[in-house]
Image (cartoon, grey):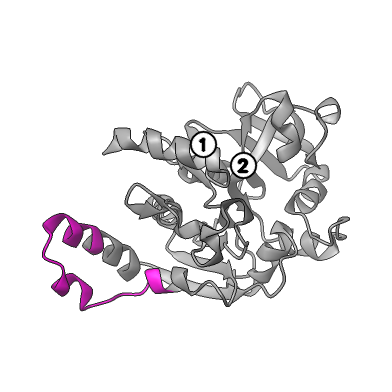
Amino acid sequence: MREVKHLIIPVAGYGTRFMPVTKSIPKEMLPILNKPLIQYAIEEAIDAGIKNFTFITSKAKTAIKDYFSYDKHLIEKISNQESRESISELDSIISQSNFEYVNQDEMLGLGHAILCGKEKIPEGNSFAVILPDDLCHSPNKSVLSQLLELHKKYPDRSIIAVEEVHSNEVEKYGVISGRNLGNSKNVFEVSSLVEKPKPEDAPSKLAVIGRYILSDSIFLNLSKTPRDNKGEIQLTEALNMSAIQGKVLAYKFSGKRYDCGSVKGFIEAQENYKKFL
C-alpha cells in the first residue's frame, strides 16, 4: 500500500469576507496569535507524516511563497530570544518540506483548484487536501492524522471529514447522505453528497469540512464534472460520483473546528487559542 505523501492546499481565493485587509494580504496569512493560518495547516500535515506540499495559488499571492522561503540572515538580525525561536521553528518546517506552486488563473471552484494540482500527484497515489480556512484543534491526534488512520484500513476509498452542524447552517456546506459503517458511530458509508442544500432538503446535518484524503480517481471525476450555474467545478459533485460507486467514507472527527473564513469564526479562534499559550 502506498502511503499518502502529498498535500494540495487551495489558496487562490480573494478572501472577500475579510476585505479590505485581504486586498494586499492573503487570507491564509492572517494570524491566529503569532502564526498565520497557513502555517497551522502545514504543521498539521507534517504531524501526519506529509512533507510534499502543492499550493494552488495566484500570481498576486507572493506572500505565501515568501513566507516559506528560508532567510539565512533574518535570525542573525533578531536579538529577542523568543522571536529567534519562532523563526527557527519556521526554518525547521521549511528545511524538511518540499513546496511547489501552481497558478490557478481563474477562480472556478474548489474542484477546479484541485484539478490544477493533478500533475504534482504521482499516478496511482491518494493525496490529502487541507482548506486553511478550517482551523482544527484536536489535543490528542490531528484531524488529518485521524483520516489517515482510517485510510490505512480502506486504502481504495476517499475519506472526508464531517461534523454535525445546526440545520440552519447546512446551506453553507456539502452535506452527506449515508449510514454508519458496521458498529462505528463515527464512520459513515457515503451514498451521496449534496452541495449547499436548503435545510428542508438536506439529507442529514453532517457537513463536509476542509480535510480530505482523496483517491487519484477524483481527477477523472473532476474532469467529467459539469460546471454549476456560477461556472464552477464543485468537488462535492465529483465526490458524489465516487460515493455512488461506494468509494467514499465520511469520518466524524474528534476535535474542534473554527471557521476562520468568517470574521466571527476567526475571532472565536483567536480567543480560544489563547488557552494554548
Q: Residue placed farthest to the front in the image?
A: 20
> On the rendered image, what quadrant is the N terminus found in?
bottom right
**Helix, strand, or loop for circle 2?**
strand
Residue 277 sits above or below residue 27 on the image: above
Question: Which residue is labeled 2 in the image?
Answer: 209
Given contact means CB atoms under 8 Å apart, are the residues at marks 2 and 1 in contact? yes
> On the rendered image, what quadrant is the C terminus found in?
top left
Q: Residue at x 48, y 32 (%)?
A: 256
Residue 100 sits above or below residue 147 on the image: below
Q: In this picture, which residue range is highlighted in magenta? A: 66-87
One can see residue 68 in this view: no
The residue lying toward the viewer, choosing from 183 and 6, is: 6
Percent of width and height locating residue 173: 71, 40
Percent of width and height locating residue 125: 60, 62
Question: Which residue is labeled 1 in the image?
Answer: 257
In the image, what residue type sits under mark 2? Ile
One can see residue 113 in this view: yes
**In the image, 248: left or right of 120?**
right
Residue 157 sits above or below residue 52 on the image: above
**Helix, strand, or loop for circle 1?**
strand
The quadrant where residue 84 appears: bottom left
The residue lying toward the viewer, choosing from 248 and 172, is: 172
